[in-house]
Amino acid sequence: MIYWGEKLEEKISMLPDSPGCYLMKNRDGTVIYVGKAVNLKNRVKSYFRDTSHTPKVAAMISHIDDFEILLCETNLEALILECNLIKHHKPYYNILLKDDKHYPYLKVDLREPFPRLEITRRMEKDGAKYFGPYIGANAVRQVIEAVRDVFPIRSCKQTLPPTRQKRPCMNSDIGRCMAPCAGKCTEAEYAEMMTGVVNFLNGDYAPVLDKLRKDMGEAAAAMRYEKAAKIRDKIRDVEGMMERQIALRTDSSEQDLIAVAQDGLDAMIQILYVRGGRMIGGDHFSLPREGGEDPGEVLAGFMLQYYENAGLIPRNVLCQVLPEGMAEQLEGWLRRKKGAAVTVAEPRRGEKHELIALAAKNAADALEKRNARRTVHEERTVGAAGKLGEILGMDRYPRRIEGYDISNTQGEQSVAAMVVFIDGEPAKKEYRHFRIRTVEGANDFASLYETLNRRYSHAAKEAAEGGNKFAELPDLILIDGGPQQLRFARQAILDLGMEPPTMFGLAEKQEEIWLPEATEPILLDHRTPELQLVQRVRDEAHRFGIIHHRALRGKASIHSRLEEIPGIGPARRKELLKAFGSLKAIREAEPEALLRVKGMNTPAVEAILRWRETNK
């Protein structure tokens, strides 16, 4: 048995037989895990006395230096406290829901005299009716459009009834609004129409389709074929909405179906939303490092965080599996949050079990697709970097790759771009620009020498004096150019008495990779991830350099135009640009504003006004 030290052993021996929460801490005092227990003594002891742990728990235990406990009266109190502690501390080894999006709902407040449809991302206890959630803004907009195609509901934000009658808008002219603002309908007539809207949003399409088919038949019989065609299109829209929703053989209550899939490393939670007896959509949540944990514990931990801030707590929550006794505890917690009856169940047979099986199938599919995407992503990033290192003869993995490119216009405004890729992905906070200082004209060789010399000089200075802008050196350097550019860049580092990392040049014509002292280039298949990584680094360096160079050219152009004005020297040009930011703003500025600029006086302002007159 492992001896954990005097401090921990004393705490372990004094653990109480009580429900509560425990907080595991590392050497720095950071909370790395929060858990709950019906019996703190048995649960917490198991971490320090048992040896059969999952890899995740074993990794967590290896970092424990201390722990705290918080006693509770009931298991439900422990559940709620655990959820709050996880939200506050965000421990590394807990399930952390990073998805903070709020799905849109449709809101209808029938207490208003002439209600309208509103999009909202939060449900309030305000007496209004809410429909959803809809998976994405596009989905909710499609529903609104379908409703307005069938029902002439108002879309304006006017306060109704109006203090005085107004002229109806175009929506009224084309039959898409009952125009209550113009007195074209009564509150009772509008309310009757809204009953159909609410039924429609609840999934009762039959009355709407019956009415539309009847209207289409009447229009066709009266030989109003254009109107009949429009109604036919509305029928197709409604039928399309019906087809996009999976009909269920359940009651019409609200249900969330929750299941989990695991692969030994990670877990994927799937929620399917059932509203009005129809499945209206679903969503999945990836839970890293939860693939080896008890599925019931994973689902219970997920539900605590998900429903803590959920806009809608449904009437029924169906779960694939939960720890023993947890369904009743979650049910009580959800009832308190909803302020109404909620049931939490683990169906074992029948239709509801089939629905959970459908959610589990979706979870497994989402996990498989996530893993496939991750495999492709790793192949294009980390895998490509590793393969590139092997091809270049490196004895270690090139974690940090830096790419360099020179941009200028006929030798003017030369600028060097340094981009950084870490583990095969852009690290944009590490990007740097260098204004070329010592080189006259278009000389990429000398410009690269200056750039690499300055970059490594900064690194040496920061190593001696501290700093972090250039402190981390690259494992691999890409130079946009052939053998000559590469030679000058490498010599810049050698002349500082420093050892260059692996470096190569990329000659753009045939994407030739040149190593120092090589007599023949390396040619890679264009379909390989490693060459595509090299191209991404080169293209990113080129893009980054061009953007900065354009900005410099723009500033230079403004300076040159301002040089035309007598009496406006370098100091005043600098202050004018600092104050107004652009040539256009200087042209449009009032004389009083120009006069307030540092260094300006009345003759200088008059000179600018004369220049503006002659350069209109």
Image: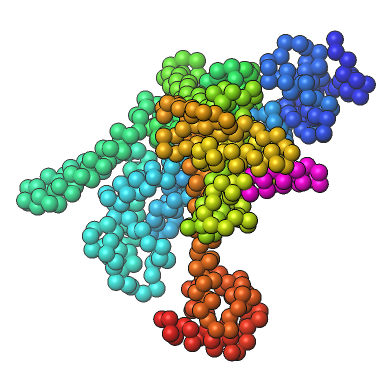
Residue occupying the point 48% across, 57% down:
409
Q: Magenta segment, principal secondary structure?
A: helix
Which of 563/23 is in front?
563
Residue 592, image x, y percentages: 58, 85
| Above or below for 333 versus 231 | above
Residue 251 visible here: yes
Which residue occupies 50% across, 34% down? 534
Name the residue at the right extreme: 6
Residue range highlighted in magenta? 450-469
Query: Is there any visible trace of residue 260 in the rendered image?
Result: no
* Residue at image point 77% right, 18% down: 47
* Residue at 78% in and 15% down: 46
Percent position of residue 261, x then y: 52, 20
- 197 vs 75, left or right, is left
- The picture quadrant where one finds residue 309 is top right
**Quarter of the figure with the C terminus:** bottom left
Is 44 located above or below residue 149 in the figure?
above
In the displayed structure image, the side of residue 256 where residue 165 appears, left or right? left
Image quadrant assignment for residue 524:
top left
| Nearer the observer, 82 or 378 | 378
Give the quarter of the figure containing the N terminus. top right
Of 537 and 279, nearer the camera is 537
Q: How is the image coloured?
A: rainbow
Is 573 situated above or below 554?
A: below
User: Is residue 228 within the magenta segment?
Assistant: no
In the rendered image, residue 434, in percent from the top left (x then y), is placed at 61, 52
The front one of 466 and 357 is: 466
- Residue 301, x across and y down, in percent: 63, 28
Residue 456 included in the magenta stretch of the image: yes
Within the image, what quadrant is residue 498 found in? top right
Task: Classify 386 as above or below 201.
Answer: above
Locate residue 541 relative to residue 574 in the image: left or right. left
